[in-house]
Amino acid sequence: MADTEREYETQRRRMVEEQLVPRGIRDQRVLGAMTRVPRHEFVPERSIPYAYEDHPIPIGDGQTISQPYIVALMLEAARIGPEDAVLDVGTGSGYAAALAAVLAHRVVSIERHSDLAVQAAATLEALGNRVEVVTGDGTLGWAPGAPYDAIVAAATGPSVPRAWSAQLAPGGRIVMPVGRPGGPQHLSLFTAGEDGTLVKKDLGSVTFVPLVGEQAWPG
């Protein structure tokens, strides 16, 4: 292993030990994925020195790569199993999709900004992450890949889009921020009951970019 790669591995382990574990992330599969996936490959070149720091990083088009802890919290809440199908809404850099790909059997990631989708797909492919990246309105989900055991969204909406509920498998989980851009937002876990009703759990206050599309906020 080259010295540079060894240093990045050290930074990932430090990120897990100092940012995630002390804040209560316990899922060993999530912690393992966060230790394994090279976050520095998903940020702009100028931001590589800050890739493993405890804050979000801008990636262009008004989007960010979320703070490591928030990414880990969302993935842990989604309870992604090795046989699960996952819809990742808001591909952005592709980092969360790469982590989901380590945890799940199949991942579809949807991004409304075509330039971000193209770049993320190229990065994911170069790193060997098997993720189907599509460009489109994330609020409509991606019906060809449904049903999904987990849907994870990196943008805040007024409520769960109807399309997501329709594409969720029985017992499936949706993790998304709910609230107005620039206003109060709460990270929420929605779990589908036997009758399809979604049961909500509040995971805490967060700040995300808006979920833009037909079934969320207008563009």
Image (cartoon, helix red, strand yellow):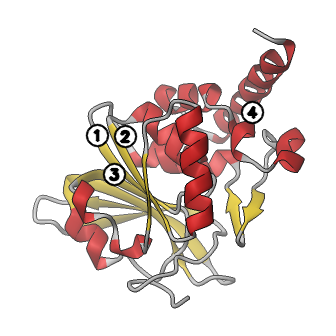
- Asked if labels 2 and 1 touch by Cβ distance under 8 angstroms, the answer is yes
Q: Are marks 3 and 1 in contact (CB under 8 Å)?
A: yes
Query: Which label belongs to residue 84?
Result: 1
What is the C-alpha distance between the residues marked 3 and 1?
7 Å
- Residue in the foreground of this view, choosing between 110 and 89: 110
Residue tagged by mark 4?
A: 15
Q: Position of residue 12 (x, y in %)?
A: 73, 28
Instruction: Name the amino acid, label 1.
Output: Asp
Q: Earlier in the sequence, mark 3 or mark 2?
A: 2
In the image, residue 173 above or below residue 17: below
Q: Amino acid at mark 4?
A: Met
Tag 3–tag 2 contact (CB < 8 Å): yes
| Image position, residue 156 (x, y; %) | 54, 73
Can you tell which quarter of the image residue 205 is in? Answer: bottom right
Mark 1 against mark 4, which lies toward the viewer? Answer: 1
Q: Is residue 165 visible?
A: yes
Labels 3 and 4: the sequence-earlier one: 4
Q: Amino acid at mark 2?
A: Ile
Relative to 131, does residue 166 appear above or below in the rendering?
Answer: below
* Distance between mark 1 and mark 4 Cα atoms: 26 Å
Residue 49 at x, y percent in the picture = 89, 39
Drawn side of residue 32 relative to residue 110, left or right:
right
Q: Earlier in the sequence, mark 2 or mark 4?
A: 4
Closer mark to the observer between disc 1 and disc 2: 1
* Residue at 37% across, 36% down: 104
| Secondary structure type for disc 4 | helix
- The answer to whether marks 1 and 4 mark residues whose Cβ atoms lie closer than 8 Å is no
Name the residue carrying label 3.
150
Element class at badge 2: loop
- Residue picked out by circle 2: 80
